[in-house]
Image (cartoon, rainbow, N blue to C red):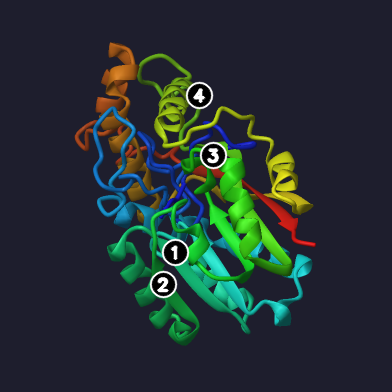
Amino acid sequence: MTQHRASQHGPSHGEGDGGRHTDAGPHTDGSPHTDGHRHTAGHGHGHGHHHDGTHLDWNELASLLELQAEIASPAYADAAAWLGTLAAVPGVRRILDVGSGPGVVTSLLAEAFPAAEAVAVDGSPELLALAQARAEVRRIGARVSTVHAELPEAIGSLGRADLIWAGNSMHHMGDQGAALAQFAELLNPGGLMVLVEGGLPTRHLPWHIGIGRPGLEARLDAAHADWFGEMRAELPDAKDEPDDWRALLAGAGLTPAGTRTFLTDVPAPVSPVVRELAVAHYTRLREGCAGRLDADDKATLDRLLDPADALSLHHRTDLFHLTARTVHTARKG
């Protein structure tokens, strides 16, 4: 997540993009979610979260973004390896990770393309510092740099690249087609544009959980879809257009090069880290969606979050983490 920001687009929420892979709206796992990426859409995004609103404080979400991205790292490593079959690895010398958030994907891309400089681009200095620190720990700090930028205004200042990765960040730009056209101008001939948008909503619980009405997560999806539509409508220069990513990429003058979906599957019983992420996810759901849920579902969320309740997320043996993220690619020239 600057930006961070399901099929393909739209309201599928879930943790895991590795960047601010999370759209964290009321759902911190983004899907628009959170991939560990932070959304970089300028105009005040990332400068204040209003409960049951559409503004997000990405610095407040930093630890959650890192958790999400770490859990999704195997899927993003697979995605990066797939990109290596689409782009000549030795020829990729500069990568832009747009909406990098804490830089989990930035480092994965740097490792997948060892001749490249990987640039983390975000609107949060604090998250960029985490991205640089992560690269240092992984001993690739010399090839990872950061750029503080609010997008889409600053797209033109990012410099040329051989690969541009936008993980759940494009949907935080009001005019997605115009932003893609600007990114296309930055690509060197043969360069690859990569969008992580869409997939499937993240699931943590079975349909019947023994509390409240069955089907809770489906109703949370609907609440998130309403939130997502409001968020999109409030963006500067918002344009109502279908999320046909292949068509949008072609409209930017690029040639679609392939689409694949990558799975993150953590079955029950989960580790303490995955359980911690689920608790944080539902905590923000309870805060962010309160005005969109009925009393029964709010009471169910309260029980799920109560450590003293034997059926809470803190103790459940049926808790899991399952999501899918879709990666769309297109080539210049």
Q: Tell me the residue at 30%/37% (across/down).
A: 284
Q: Tell which of 258 and 268 is nearer to you.
A: 258
Question: What amino acid is at disc 4?
Answer: Trp
Return the x and y of residue 234 as percentages of the image width and height: 39, 30
Checking the image for residue 170, the label placed there is none
Dot placed on the residue nearer the N-terminal end, 2 or 3:
2
Disc 3: CA contacts within 10 A as few (<14), some (14-19) or many (>=20): some
On screen, residue 305 versus residue 115, left or right, reads left
Residue 139 found in image quarter: bottom left
Which residue type does callout 3 highlight? Asp
Task: Look at label 1 and name its amino acid.
Answer: Val
Residue 299 image offset from top left, x and y in percent: 26, 19
| Disc 1 secondary structure class | strand
Q: Residues within 10 Å of mark 1 (few under 14, many from 20)?
A: many
Quarter where residue 101 is shown? bottom left
How far apart are labels 4 and 2 at the CA level? 42 Å
Label 4 CA crowd tier, 10 Å (few <14, some 14–19, many 20+):
few
Is residue 60 found left or right of 136 in the rendered image?
left
Q: Earlier in the sequence, mark 4 or mark 2?
A: 2
Disc assigned to residue 146: 2
Instruction: Name which residue lies at 61% across and 40% down.
Output: 199
